[in-house]
Image (spheres, rainbow, N blue to C red):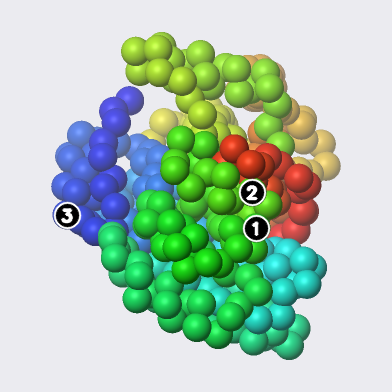
Amino acid sequence: LSMKDSGDGANLAVSSQSATAAIAAGTDVVLGAAASGVTRNIINQITGAGIVEISPSNTAPDLSTWKDNGFYFRTAPSDTLQGRIAANQILQDGAQNVAIMYDDNSYGNGLLAVAQSVLKKAGATVTAVANTEGETNFGSIVAKVTAGNPDAVLIISYDETKKSIPALKAAGFSGANIYLVDGNTIDYSKESFATYLNGAKGTIPGGSITDAFKGRLKAKYAKLNGGKELADFTYAAESYDAVVLAALAAQASGKATGAGIKSKLTDVSLAGKGKVNVTSYAAGLKALKAGKSINYDGYSGPIEFDKNGDPTGAFIGIYRYDAKGVNHLVRTVAGNK
């Protein structure tokens, strides 16, 4: 096992170097990249080398039909689902004049297309304003966003959100009418604008994970990081399940190689007659050693990979911020892509 930096969309050379190093080391499975745009940069390189790539957090819709020879999988649902549910939440809350501020990259454009389509079909007015990834000056961007007096603002972004939210606050927009997505629905309690977000909502793929599971993750994180506390569990379940699925696929095929894991990865995720349903690696290993076929259902959901390596059944959590800038799960919406 080795850890390599995938970088971000602002410096794709980092991911290229890491992918080259992983291939040279004879890697069989790559877990990642975290961002869809980064995966776009390395997916041909990795899958072309016969290595299985599993991302726990890629959500760009175009990755579903990427020509990857069947070596690419993801445990997070496509933004086709998240974009629809985020838009429906905005409509459900009564907004009809919506501004969308989005990163001009594969992630931002993918989510924008789905959310905008759903909102417009419902009769809402939509104004979309782009910003570059890594943008720091949001004054003029927010001026465009608020020019039409929107009753909701959807922000599709990553770290840039920590700059755009203060700009919205300075412009006098209501923090309770801000909507976020998986890239920025995080704990903002240590930010100066924490209280401003009271009532804001966000979406994160995945359902509710248990306190026991969180406790295990916290303990391991603290041990590996000098006692630091893990506070963000976004895509934690999807990451865990990706590792377990890869291990079970290797056991099922009898070959810990890219080709071997690929050949069984879908099968161990699918329910079926005569299969043993398992929810842990230990249970799956026991069943496989007994000559049984298995269906792994994980912390992120039933998974059930389709022919594109996408989870066909998935959940999106709707979160609401309190007066301390902390997001809390309100409900989970089941759906498929």
Say whether marks 1 and 2 touch (CB < 8 Å). yes
Q: Few, some or many C-alpha atoms within 10 Å of disc 3 (few <14, some 14-19, many ≥20)? A: some
Vertical side of 230 occupied by 87: above or below? below
Q: Picture coordinates of residue 336 (x, y %)?
A: 71, 60
Q: Nearer the viewer, mark 1 or mark 3?
A: 1
Q: Nearer the viewer, residue 138 or 285?
A: 138
Q: Secondary structure at mark 1?
A: helix
Q: Residue at x 73, y 64 (%)?
A: 89
**123 left or right of 150 in image:** right
**In which quadrant will I find the N terminus?**
top left
Q: In the image, which disc is placed on residue 198?
A: 2
The image quadrant that residue 28 belongs to is top left
Measured in 3D between alpha carbons, the distance from the residue under mark 1 to the one under mark 2, in whole angstroms, is 6 Å
Amino acid at pointer 3? Ala
**232 left or right of 44 in image:** right
Q: Residue at x 76, y 31 (%)?
A: 277
Q: Few, some or many C-alpha atoms within 10 Å of disc 1 (few <14, some 14-19, many ≥20)? A: some
Amino acid at pointer 1? Ala
Can residue 151 be seen from the camera position used here?
yes
Measured in 3D between alpha carbons, the distance from the residue under mark 1 to the one under mark 3, in whole angstroms, is 39 Å
Q: Residue at x 51, y 77 (%)?
A: 146
Vertical side of 333 occupied by 289: above or below? above
> Where is mark 3, residue-wise?
13
Q: Residue at x 67, y 18 (%)?
A: 212
Q: Few, some or many C-alpha atoms within 10 Å of disc 2 (few <14, some 14-19, many ≥20)? A: many
Q: Picture coordinates of residue 168 (x, y %)?
A: 48, 64
Can residue 264 be seen from the camera position used here?
no
| Label located before the other in sequence (1 or 3) | 3
Q: In the image, which disc is placed on residue 176?
A: 1
Measured in 3D between alpha carbons, the distance from the residue under mark 3 to the one under mark 2, in whole angstroms, is 39 Å
Q: Secondary structure at mark 3?
A: helix
Q: Secondary structure at mark 2?
A: loop
